[in-house]
Amino acid sequence: MAPLPVIPSVIRAAFTWTSSEYTRHSVNVMHFESDGSDIDALHTQLEAAVTVQMWSHTPNTSHITSIRYTPLDGLGASIERSTTGGSKWSGNGTPGTTTPQVAAIIKLLTDARGRSFRGRVYLPWVGEGDATSGILSSIEVTALQGAWTTFRGAMAGAGFPLKVASYKLSSAANVSSIVAESQLATQRRRQPRPT
């Protein structure tokens, strides 16, 4: 694995998902503007801003158990913090059959053009009842859109704006809008093993 780039005032946050149905974890990586010494403040704000509607399509047997923070200042060490748990850190869907290799997509857009200024969050373990022929239900898309837009605003308002980080360019740009996509997608390395 290549070393992480140096991007001042940006913290990489890796959200670790666990599920009673799979032995392999899923991880969502997001980036936030913050001084490297503000990991505790960033974690506190994430605890305040996260809502259960952000993962409404994921069965409630799935949980975000911890977040690994890595300052991209080239100096700070990674620190892992457990979440407080509870419903806001768990999926909101009914337990049942999931399609493990597909994910709901949250598209992160910035005001700059080009691939290096667009990002995605691949939300795992879509319930089969929430999708038809690879299309997420309109109810779920609406719930995700509202929740992620609110989350982006809350993080920016608290001084920790969500960023799209380009490891190629060693730069980051503020996320200016979010789009919850109806089309499900796959990501390489996202093939969980059943228990």
Image (tube, rainbow, N blue to C red):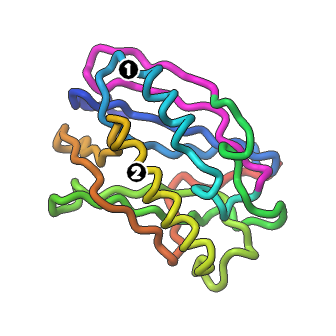
Is 64 colored magenta in this rendering?
yes
Task: Please tell me which of labels 2 and 1 falls first in the chain.
Answer: 1
Identify which amino acid the numbered label 1 is placed on: Asp
Classify mark 2: residues with Cα within 10 Å, few (<14), some (14-19) or many (20+).
many
Q: Residues within 10 Å of mark 1 (few under 14, many from 20)?
A: some
Which residue was labeled with disc 1? 38
Q: Quadrant of the N terminus?
A: top left
- In percent of width and height, residue 69 lies at 45, 27
**Height in image: 16 above or below 190?**
above
Q: Residue at x 51, y 77 (%)?
A: 182
Query: How far across and down, in percent of the image, does residue 89 sit?
Result: 66, 43
What residue occupies the far bottom of the structure in this picture?
Answer: 133
Residue 95 falls left or right of residue 116? right
**Rendered image: mark on residue 152:** 2
Find the magenta span and give its range.
60-82
Q: Quadrant of residue 184?
A: bottom right
Left or right placement of residue 118 versus residue 106 in this view: left
Q: Is residue 24 visible?
A: no
**Front position in the image: 100 or 7:** 7
- Give the residue furthest to the front: 157
Q: Foreground residue, 87 or 113?
A: 87
> Helix, strand, or loop for circle 2?
helix
Is the stretch drawn in magenta largely helix, strand or loop? strand
